[in-house]
């Protein structure tokens, strides 16, 4: 929920107004689109008789944001059993921000490996083109002899396996 709305503003609002529905209603005025419309829809659903729990879950399902399930479940748990919801939401927001930062760091750290995969894929065909231009007779045995075809096939398989291995190594999951 903190991630769906505005983590710091919502935490402050919950500190001042401990009721979840009233805090959302109070915060609604200060939000910008598109989250303002989402909170308005949530408040309208609650006004029409839906429980705050169902309305929050529907709002979360409409928004594909990182950390949304954790935020909504923490909000609902704190709502049901009590506790410092504003603190919990701030911690979730901090965790989501840190995960986004780490994803960026990993993306930059693995960029070199991804570029190596491109180089590995481009150098052999590029080298064959250069050799073909320099002296076409050098590569004649590869094109015209069955043993050359086998060598090209094996080299192609090794090339594909190498690129697939590089991609697998570079696929870091957080």
Image (cartoon, rainbow, N blue to C red):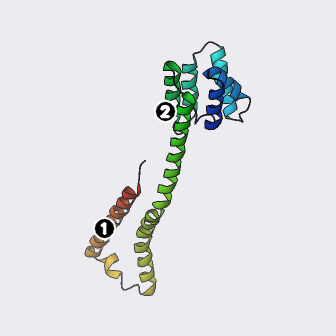
Q: Residue 153's mark?
A: 1
Tag 2 residue = 70
Residue 64 in sight in this render: no
* Spot occupied by residue 36 in the image (x, y as percentages of width and height): 69, 31
* Spot occupied by residue 122 in the image (x, y as percentages of width and height): 44, 70
Viewer-nearest of labels 1 and 2?
2
Q: Quadrant of residue 140?
A: bottom left
| Label 1 vs 2, first from the N-terminus | 2
Element assignment for label 2: helix
Q: Residue at x 31, y 64 (%)?
A: 157
The reply, left or right, for residue 135 in relation to residue 49 is: left
Q: Residue furthest left?
A: 147
Question: Is 86 above or below relative to 98?
Answer: above
The span from disc 1 to disc 2 (Cα, nearest Å) is 50 Å
* Spot occupied by residue 16 in the image (x, y as percentages of width and height): 66, 26
Question: Is 9 above or below relative to 131?
Answer: above
* Spot occupied by residue 168 in the image (x, y as percentages of width and height): 37, 56
Counting other residues with Cα less than 10 Å from the Cα at mark 2, is it few (<14), some (14-19), or many (20 or more)? some
Residue 157 in sight in this render: yes
Question: Is 110 above or below relative to 27?
Answer: below
The N terminus lies in which quarter of the figure?
top right
Q: Residue at x 58, y 27 (%)?
A: 59
Label pair 1/2, CB-CB below 8 angstroms: no
In-front residue for pair 107/139: 107
Q: Quadrant of residue 33?
A: top right
In-front residue for pair 104/77: 77
Element assignment for label 1: helix
In-front residue for pair 14/60: 14
């Amino acid at each position: 929920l903190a991630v769906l709305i505005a983590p710091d503003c919502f935490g402050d609002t919950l500190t001042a107004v401990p009721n979840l529905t009233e805090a959302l209603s109070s915060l609604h005025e200060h939000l910008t689109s598109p989250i303002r419309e989402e909170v308005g829809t949530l408040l309208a659903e609650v006004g029409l008789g839906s429980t705050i729990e169902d309305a929050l879950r529907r709002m979360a399902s409409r928004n594909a944001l990182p950390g949304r399930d954790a935020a909504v479940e923490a909000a609902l748990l704190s709502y049901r059993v009590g506790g410092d919801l504003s603190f919990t939401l701030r911690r979730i927001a901090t965790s989501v921000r840190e995960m986004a930062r780490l994803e960026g760091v990993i993306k930059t750290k693995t960029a070199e490996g991804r570029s190596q995969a491109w180089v590995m894929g481009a150098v052999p065909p590029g080298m064959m083109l250069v050799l073909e231009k320099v002296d076409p007779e050098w590569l004649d045995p590869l094109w015209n002899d069955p043993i050359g075809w086998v060598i090209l096939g094996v080299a192609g398989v090794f090339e594909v396996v190498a690129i697939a291995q590089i991609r697998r190594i570079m696929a870091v999951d957080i």
